[in-house]
Amino acid sequence: MSEPLAERMRPRTLNDYVGQQHLVGEGAILRKMIDAGRISSFILWGPPGSGKTTLAHIIANQLETPFFTLSAVTSGVKDVREVIERAKSGRFFNNASPILFIDEIHRFSKSQQDSLLGAVERGIVTLIGATTENPSFEVIRPLLSRCQLYVLKPLEKEDLMALLNRAINEDVELKKKHITLKETGAIMRYSGGDARKLLNILELVVEAANSDTIEITDEMVENRLQQNPLAYDKDGEMHYDIISAFIKSIRGSDPDAALYWMARMIEGGEDPQFIARRLVISAAEDIGLANPNALLLANAAFDAVMKIGWPEGRIPLAEAAVYLATSPKSNSAYLGIDKALATVRQTGNQPVPLPLRNAPTKLMEQLGYHDGYMYPHDYPGNFVEQQYLPDGLKNERFWHAQHSTLEEKNYQQMLRCWKDRFKE
């Protein structure tokens, strides 16, 4: 049985490699390292079909160094250690370190990634990891800090066209046929910059034609595939890009863009609970005190989706998205808690002032716990000025009002209570 077209067309040298010229073109960083004959550990981050695995194999072949590979799906910590021992015993003095290639490294557990650290740090192996996921989320920080990160881009239309023409004219099976590319819009759209998917689609269309003379059109491709080209991988990079665009559209007060990106997620099969959670976070982070009702509405939308599900759940989600996008914005609470957290990390465990301490025992009373505390409700306006922050931080300010219509009321109340302390 013949190999799949994508495997038959896999490049064997950098000269045949398509795309990623920012990494492997003349004078580019990876090209320089390969030409010098010595590379450091790195992680290749890019969408499916952008050439990560192919590039790793080309590097190993060109450097003529032992090449070990592990499957992140089937390998455990024991397998990692065995490969490291094999690499250690097979290495000769002054030779380049064996290459350990781990595809889908984002699927490795923390313990599996931990087991790599020592070998990478001591140069027992040169690690090449490949991932479709953002390494910031999926690769542990100690391992990430020991590797360079190189980002691969989806292949451009010119790259994909070059691949198509090369496959038609050079592949051992396809060149036996008379194949004409009359239209390429559909095959480009369905492949989504993925070289492997492009070649798989070409192979499927050619096999389905069952003829030696084939004219490829958009209609032919669409009829063969019958799938949604808008769908995205809910666990992949697109997942993070689209939710980021959605949240930034709300923050930027653009309800049209917010609805568009929500529609992209819905059509792509995103979990409605994920969308609802992000709306709740946005209501607290971006709308905040400028419109406290936003958090109530976002939370109500979350509850509604949990109760009614799809497809009707799209309506309360859309209602919440539009309401949040059209609401005034304030991130004063968000900035305030982050500043307070940073201060806590810098200053450590500051002692609680004695008047604020609880005094459940006689000894604590004798030590002065609770002494001097003034109960605000015993005073006019339910307020009395006293110190609530630790002594070392008593003049610190964490919350700064942003003077939206509703938040201004809170600010004026603070001025009435604390006067100069809250003057901006």
Image: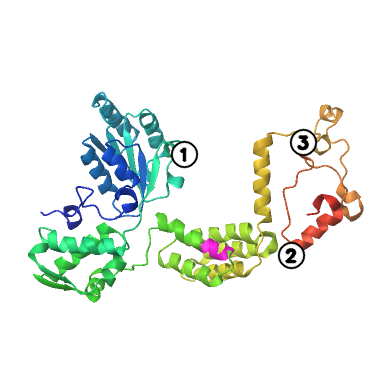
First of labels 3, 2 by sequence position: 3
Magenta segment boundaries in residue numbering: 246-251
Residue 418 is inside the magenta segment: no
Mark 3, Cα crowd under 10 Å, few <14 / some 14-19 / many 20+, is: few
Label 3 or label 2, whichever lies nearer to me, is 3
- Name the residue: 74% across, 64% down: 406
What percent of the width, then of the height, locates residue 338?
64, 47
Q: Position of residue 233 (x, y in %)?
A: 38, 58
- For label 1, the crowd category at 10 Å Cα-Cα, with few meaning under 14, some 14 to 19 and many 20 or more, is few
Badge 2 amino acid: Leu
Q: Residue at x 25, y 26 (%)?
A: 91
Q: CA distance from mark 2 to mark 1?
A: 42 Å
Q: Are marks 2 and 1 in contact (CB under 8 Å)?
A: no
The tag earlier along the polypeptide, 2 or 1, is 1
Marking on residue 392: 3
Q: Is residue 298 visible?
A: yes
Badge nearest the viewer, 2 or 1: 1
Q: Is residue 349 left or right of residue 66?
A: right
Residue found farthest to the bottom: 219
The answer to whether 358 appears left or right of 102 in the picture is right
Name the colour scheme.
Answer: rainbow
Q: Which residue: 77% across, 37% down?
A: 390
Residue assigned mark 2: 406
- Place residue 170 in its image quadrant: bottom left
**Which residue is denoted by mark 1 in the rendering?**
141
Report helix, strand or loop for mark 2.
helix
Q: Amino acid at mark 1?
A: Arg
**Front residue of 226 and 156:** 156
